[in-house]
């Protein structure tokens, strides 16, 4: 099934900011919100990332909570996000 790829300007800005996060690194939802000029829109950033139609291309798993918890991935708390972050960090170290 094909996902609807129509996005708001806000969602597009969130996804573009997420593309700036380097491989193997993370940033917070607050960082993304500040990056797009909407520092109080932290929860809206999370909602926009949950609707990411291209998770293999736009690395929404690199965005974590400010308290250090990885948070959910695609609306689920099944450990995938933590595993993806750990895998990227390990690959980054091997490639150095």
Image: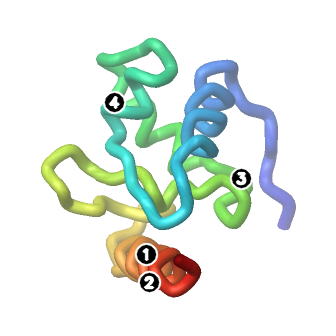
Q: Which residue is mark 4?
A: 42
Q: Residue 62: where, in percent of width, then height?
A: 45, 57
Residue at image coords 57%, 34%? 17
Q: Which residue is mark 3?
A: 53
First in sequence: mark 4 or mark 3?
4
Tell me the CA gap for discs 3 and 2: 26 Å
- Locate residue 55: give its quadrant: bottom right
Callout 3 touching callout 2 (CB < 8 Å): no
Tell me the CA gap for discs 4 and 1: 25 Å
Q: Residue 58: where, in percent of width, then height?
A: 66, 53
The reply to whether residue 84 is visible in this rendering is no
Callout 2 touching callout 1 (CB < 8 Å): yes
Choose mark 4 or mark 1, whichever is in front: 1
Q: Which residue is mark 1?
A: 89
Q: Residue 60: where, in percent of width, then height?
A: 53, 54
Q: Residues within 10 Å of mark 3 (few under 14, many from 20)?
A: some
Left or right: 39, with 67 as reference point: right
Residue occupying the far left of the picture: 67
Residue at image coords 44%, 83%? 90
Choose mark 3 or mark 1, whichever is in front: 1
Q: Residue 41: where, in percent of width, then height?
A: 37, 22
Q: Residues within 10 Å of mark 4 (few under 14, many from 20)?
A: some
First in sequence: mark 4 or mark 1?
4
Labelled disc at residue 90: 2
* Quadrant, the N terminus: bottom right
């Amino acid at each position: 099934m094909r996902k609807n790829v129509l996005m708001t300007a806000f969602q597009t800005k969130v996804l573009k900011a997420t593309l700036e996060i380097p491989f193997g690194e993370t940033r917070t939802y607050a960082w993304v919100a500040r990056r797009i000029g909407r520092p109080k829109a932290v929860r809206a950033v999370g909602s926009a990332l949950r609707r990411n139609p291209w998770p293999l291309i736009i690395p929404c798993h690199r965005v974590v909570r400010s308290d250090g918890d990885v948070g959910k991935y695609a609306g689920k708390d099944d450990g995938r996000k933590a595993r993806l972050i750990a895998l990227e960090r390990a690959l980054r170290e091997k490639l150095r």
